[in-house]
Image: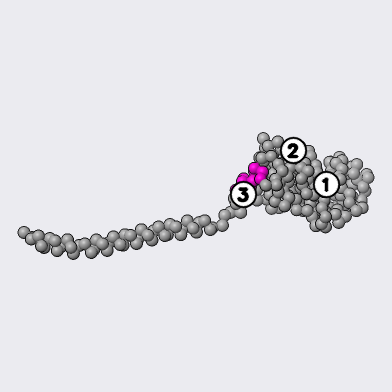
Amino acid sequence: MRDVTEIETSWQAEEPRRAGRGWIYLLVGIGLCLAAFASVVWMSFEEEDPARAKARRLEAELTPAGLDDHPPLRFANDELALTNPPFRRVIESDIDDRLVCGIEANGKSVAIILRPTERRDNLILSTTVGGKPIVVTHNYLLDTTRVFTGDSTEPIDLRLGGFTDSKQLVLLYQDVRYLQESDRIPLPDYPYVITTLRKWYADHPDTLLNDSEQRNDIMYYWPTYQE
């Protein structure tokens, strides 16, 4: 039979080993926590896909804020205008009754074919005519047109800003969104004519024509307007 002194001595010898294992468990736990924290931090700094990042940002811009002049949006966009598209001489086979937006500036004239497509609810075209900056905006859903000019000799950076629930076109200029018809857009209006190519060409035989595909090459986020 073991005496009490021997049992106590055995227990006392085991105590340091238990304490050592406790420290090991503690250090392992701390290491796992640090690894998990580092993983979270790394993921937070990882670059987000540009398309997803833009879509998430635009979703937050559906409600007007600051200097915005529009009701709540159904779609928010930030899409560049069709800038400096090609123009060419009119040939006989072109002449028909397609609608155009006709513009004259400094003795030069251009005709821009108005042509909606399945993927295009609007036209925003930025160019120069006779050295004058001109940007044409047209909403195919409501058949509304507005043309602007500016003081620079460079094309105007006016963008697609979105659509409202009532199908109104919203323009984006210098990070502020405006209804197409807003009187707060800080750009002067410019005169234009909506007519047929046949009639415009009869009055402007030297006109240049744009009938290219009215679509930009870079579109990160483009929801079409469907009921």
**Point 64% across, 42% down: residue:** 63
Query: Closer to the camera: disc 3 or disc 2?
Result: 3
In reply to whether residue 63 is colored magenta, the answer given is yes
Where disc 1 sits, the SS reads loop
To which residue does mark 2 refer?
Answer: 141
Residue 168 in the image: state x and y as whole percent.
Answer: 73, 39
Can residue 17 be spotted in the picture? yes
Q: In 3D space, how far apart are the residues under numbered discs 1 and 3 (Cα atoms)?
A: 30 Å
Residue 101 in the image: state x and y as whole percent.
Answer: 84, 44
Q: Which residues are magenta?
A: 56-65
Residue 46 in the image: state x and y as whole percent.
Answer: 54, 58
Where disc 3 sits, the SS reads helix
Q: Is residue 61 left or right of residue 94?
A: left
Can residue 116 be spotted in the picture? no
Q: In 3D space, how far apart are the residues under numbered discs 1 and 2 (Cα atoms)?
A: 21 Å
The label number, if any, that marks residue 140 in the structure image: none
Given the image, on which type of amino acid does mark 2 rest? Leu
To which residue does mark 1 refer?
Answer: 189
Query: Closer to the camera: disc 1 or disc 3?
Result: 1
Q: Is residue 153 left or right of residue 65?
A: right
Given the image, on which type of amino acid does mark 3 rest? Arg
The label number, if any, that marks residue 57 in the structure image: 3
Query: To which quarter of the image does residue 180 belong?
Result: top right
Q: Residues within 10 Å of mark 2 (few under 14, many from 20)?
A: some
Q: Is residue 125 left or right of residue 41?
A: right
Q: Residues within 10 Å of mark 3 (few under 14, many from 20)?
A: few
Q: Point out the tag, 1 or 2, that comes first from the N-terminus.
A: 2
